[in-house]
Structure formats: C-alpha cells, structure tokens
Image (cartoon, rainbow, N blue to C red):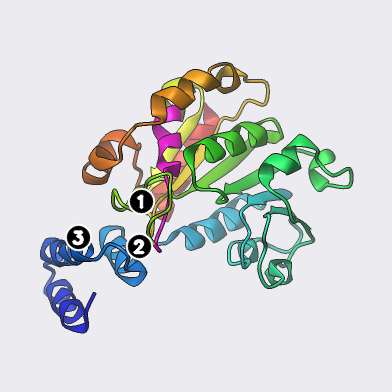
Amino acid sequence: MDTQTMRSARRFIARGQFDEAEALIGHALVQEPNLPATHVALAKLRWPGMDYLEWLGWFHSVLSPGLYVEIGVERGNSLAQARPGTQVVGIDPAPQAQPQARCAGPVQLFSQTSAEFFTAMPENCYLQNRGFDLAFIDGDHRFEAVLADFMALEKWAAPEAVVLIHDTIPLTSATSISQRKTGFYSGDAWKIVPCLRSLRPDLHLVTLPAAPTGLTVVTGLNPASRTLQERLPSVRAAYASLSSAHIVSMPAAFLALGSNDRDWMSNWLRQARAQ
C-alpha cells in the first residue's frame, strides 16, 4: 500500500469509518496482492482486540499446563508464552535463532517434522511420560498437515486438554489456499474447522476472531477416537477443492466464531469442560 493510501485509511479509521477503511485496503490488495504489511493492517482492522499471541499467553496463564506441546516453533515468539514450571515440547524442522532460549520452562526442542516426530517419538520426550494439557498447532499450514497434526496430538491428550489451532480464519482468498503465492500466507488450515464440526460433534470447538488469522480452541478430546482416521480418504477428497470465498465474506456462518473477550472465553471454557 502506498503512503497516500495508508494515510487515507488511517483518516477513515480515526473517523470511525471502518467499512470505508477496509474497502480502501481491500482495493489496494486487489491491485497488488503481495503486500504483507497491508494484509496485517487489514487483519487488525477486521479483528480488533487481543491477537493470537496474547491469547496463547492467556491460555498458559489460565490453564497452567503441566505439559505444553507446540508444532511450529520458528523464532520462539509462541514458546515465550509458556510459564515457568511448564514442561515444553517444541517440534519444528527448521527452528530459527535458538527459540528455546526464550522459554521460561524446561524445553525439549526436536528439529524434525511433526510427521517424523509422531511416527517415531524420541524415547526421552516428556510426552512419553504424561499426556499434554495444552497444545498449539502452527506448523505446516496446509489442511492435510493440520488434520494430521490434530489426529496425532489427540492420541496424547490428558483429560481436559486444550488444543489451539492457528490460521483458521481466512483473511483473503489469495492468502488462504494450499499453495503459497503471497508473502502473507495462512494456507488452507481453516478447513480444519468445518471438518471437525462435521465429523467430530463430540468435540467442543470455537474460533476466536483474533488477528491476524484466527485461533480455534478445541477441547473434549478423545484419545480413543478413530473417526477421522477411518474417514481420511473421503475427507481429503471432500475438502480438496473447497474454496475460501464464502468463508472470507461470511466467517461467522462457517467457523463457529466466538468473542475476542477474556470473560466470554472463560465462560465458554468452563461450560465446555462441564459437559
């Protein structure tokens, strides 16, 4: 987005004309879809309030997990949300700049893909001794990989465990497809939400409209469930060609959106765990 356009968008925002600001930013992205900073500006405008990292920190604070598993560590911004005393398992094939140094708890960092990790879990891994209480999926953003990560994690869930899945609200159609073509990219991870809502009604699921691309909260996990595994071929076929166009324009109709509010989330979590 050029400087003049950004100034115009800020003037709209200052006057409370948010629809006009979003339309202006959207027009800029139609003209040039590969503008990461402009995508971030659009996300913050569309989803004000706590962003996904703030929510991750909130879940750590509220749940005080004994064991936390994170898929997709990168530089450690998300690992840094863990509290002292929490055992942490980080999984990333290419972690950057010693991300474990940013974590307050004891960390085991495994430099491999999540598929490799769950196929042959290291013998000394914390997860061998107890189930996880909180997990965060933010690795490969393609639907099939996110689904595989969820299925693998669920087998290791402790009672009342919570799984958080990032990138579950598509910001634009161009940034929410399987193949990456833009600098700002969330992939088609969003497909996990309609998939779980359809095939796993036993789960409790809500999607927080948090910038930049949403955070889905899942609890009521069942390590013994094999529903997804048994239907995997048909699931892959059914969701392969699903477009994000309708999701982008009407996310509330498809993604079980909650409220970006701590009190709302506290009440939802309490009710979900009571069922």
Going by the numbered disc 3, the residue's amino acid type is Val
| Circle 2: element type | loop
Category of crowding for the residue at label 3, using alpha-carbon neighbours closer than 10 angstroms: few (below 14), some (14–19), many (at least 20): few
- Which mark identifies residue 30? 3
* Residue 201 appears in the rendering: no
Category of crowding for the residue at label 1, using alpha-carbon neighbours closer than 10 angstroms: few (below 14), some (14–19), many (at least 20): many
| Circle 3: element type | helix
Do residues under tags 1 and 2 come within 8 Å of each other at their CB atoms?
yes
- Which mark identifies residue 49? 2
Q: Nearer the viewer, residue 67 or 198?
A: 198
Going by the numbered disc 2, the residue's amino acid type is Gly
Q: Please identify the quadrant where the N terminus is shown.
A: bottom left
At 15% from the left and 63% from the top, the residue drawn is: 27
Going by the numbered disc 1, the residue's amino acid type is Pro
Do residues under tags 3 and 1 come within 8 Å of each other at their CB atoms?
no
Q: Nearer the viewer, residue 166 or 218?
A: 166
Q: CA distance from mark 3 to mark 1?
A: 23 Å
Q: CA distance from mark 1 to mark 2?
A: 9 Å
**Residue 273 percent coordinates (x, y):** 55, 33
**Residue 194 percent coordinates (x, y):** 39, 31
Q: Tell me: residue 266, above or below residue 81.
A: above
Q: Which residues are magenta?
A: 183-195
* Residue highlighted by disc 1: 209
Q: Nearer the viewer, residue 84 or 218?
A: 218
Tally the marks: 3
At 73% from the left and 42% from the top, the residue drawn is: 116
Q: Position of 266 compared to 24: left or right?
A: right
1 vs 2, front mark: 1
3 vs 1, front mark: 3
| Circle 1: element type | loop
